[in-house]
């Protein structure tokens, strides 16, 4: 199979038929062997019924329906797990991503031997205050933190080698940082392509301003995980040891001063150095223990199910 198109969605009943027809037309005109995998992330409208209807008319259509809303990252994880195509394309279901971009994305992966191509919506039709400006700030921070020089980390339209999607773990809300996850997994041939962005045709966006706050928090998380995820003791142990050493030096100074230099001076507990030493040694010990506990958790963790599937079609 040439291409797997993975489409996470939530309450997009108006756009699914049109999106399917558009993708099928592009695939047919380019003679691609393909599959379309719809991941219904707990929709409360008629999205799943439409996916079932499409699957009966086109055997290339596959679908997974979550029992409730688990989030876009979990939907992509489920779609990537099922994808069989040599090249996997992810795109949103709201018709803001153009399926006409698929052939060029496919060629970039296959002909240029790239691991991942991320879309760049250079010209956007979203609100400047609510989406464009926060997005620019978010992408600038992501570039600085990750070392990847991409303009649009959160673009839903991306192309991947099949090996990439099988070797990255998209969890939590990390769908914004798939290029960073790929880089951390050793897939370094990452590029971007300017893609057409279209104004939303049906419904309203399912994401609010809180996604940018969550995005920055996730950015800190992924930075930490990429640097110290496999070795938390290297961070917490080092910080703990350093802070404890400062406290110990203060305590040693106080002890020597009281015993040998000024034995008749004021009580140690009346001096601010005593409390600095005490707090520093306690915090240092806690940081060290945090790193130790992190190492224990890392070695004993198991991968629990992050979502529950209630229905499938053509799978």
Image (tube, rainbow, N blue to C red):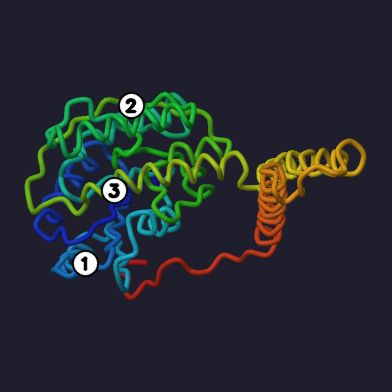
Label whose residue precedes the other's in the sequence (3 or 1): 1
Q: Residue at x 30, y 71 (%)?
A: 68
Q: Residue at x 70, y 48 (%)?
A: 270
Give the structural element (helix, strand or loop) at label 2: loop
Give the alpha-carbon distance from disc 1 to disc 2, as whole Å. Answer: 31 Å
Residue 41 is situated, as x and y percent measured from the top left of the image, at 28, 63
Give the alpha-carbon distance from disc 3 to disc 1, as whole Å. Answer: 19 Å
Residue 88 is situated, as x and y percent measured from the top left of the image, at 38, 44
Choose mark 2 or mark 3, whichever is in front.
Answer: 3
Give the image quarter of residue 206: bottom left
Q: Is residue 166 left or right of residue 61?
A: right
Give the image quarter of residue 153: top left
Residue topped by disc 1:
43
Residue topped by disc 3:
211
Give the alpha-carbon distance from disc 2 to disc 3, as whole Å. Answer: 18 Å
Choose mark 3 or mark 1, whichever is in front.
Answer: 3
Is residue 149 positioned above or below 178 on the image?
above
Q: Nearer the viewer, residue 221 or 96?
A: 221
Q: Residue furthest right?
A: 260
Residue 119 is situated, as x and y percent measured from the top left of the image, at 30, 32
Q: Residue at x 38, y 56 (%)?
A: 79
Query: Visible in this render: residue 231?
Result: no
How many other residues sit within 10 Å of disc 1, few (<14), some (14-19) or many (≥20)? Answer: some
Give the image quarter of residue 258: top right
Please identify the quadrant where the C terminus is shown.
bottom left
Query: Visible in this render: residue 270?
Result: yes
Q: Is residue 46 left or right of residue 109?
A: left
Identify the mark at residue 28; answer none if there is no mark. none
Residue topped by disc 2:
151
**Number of numbered discs present?**
3
Label whose residue precedes the other's in the sequence (1 or 2): 1
Give the structural element (helix, strand or loop) at label 1: loop
């Amino acid at each position: 199979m040439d291409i797997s198109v993975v489409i996470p969605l939530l309450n997009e009943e108006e756009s699914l038929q049109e999106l399917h027809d558009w993708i099928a037309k592009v695939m047919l005109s380019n003679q691609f062997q393909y599959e379309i995998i719809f991941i219904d992330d707990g929709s409360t409208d008629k999205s799943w019924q439409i996916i079932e209807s499409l699957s009966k008319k086109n055997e290339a259509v596959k679908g997974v329906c979550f029992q409730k809303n688990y989030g876009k990252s979990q939907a992509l994880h489920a779609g990537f797990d099922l994808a069989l195509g040599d090249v996997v394309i992810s795109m949103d279901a709201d018709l803001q991503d153009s399926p006409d971009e698929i052939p060029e994305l496919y060629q970039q992966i296959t002909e240029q031997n790239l691991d991942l191509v991320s879309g760049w919506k250079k010209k956007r039709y979203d609100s400047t205050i609510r989406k464009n400006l926060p997005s620019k700030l978010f992408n600038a921070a992501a570039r600085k933190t990750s070392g990847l020089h991409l303009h649009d980390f959160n673009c839903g339209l991306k192309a991947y080698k099949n090996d990439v999607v099988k070797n990255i773990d998209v969890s939590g809300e990390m769908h914004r940082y798939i290029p960073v996850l790929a880089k951390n997994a050793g897939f370094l041939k990452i590029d971007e392509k300017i893609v057409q962005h279209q104004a939303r045709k049906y419904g309203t966006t399912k994401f609010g301003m809180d996604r940018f706050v969550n995005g920055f928090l996730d950015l800190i998380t992924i930075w930490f995980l990429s640097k110290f995820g496999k070795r938390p003791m290297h961070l917490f142990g080092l910080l703990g040891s350093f802070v404890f050493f400062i406290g110990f030096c203060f305590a040693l100074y106080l002890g020597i001063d009281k015993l040998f230099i000024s034995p008749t001076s004021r009580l140690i507990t009346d001096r601010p150095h005593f409390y600095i030493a005490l707090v520093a040694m306690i915090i240092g010990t806690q940081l060290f223990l945090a790193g130790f506990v992190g190492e224990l958790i890392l070695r004993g963790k198991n991968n629990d199910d992050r979502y529950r599937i209630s229905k499938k079609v053509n799978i």
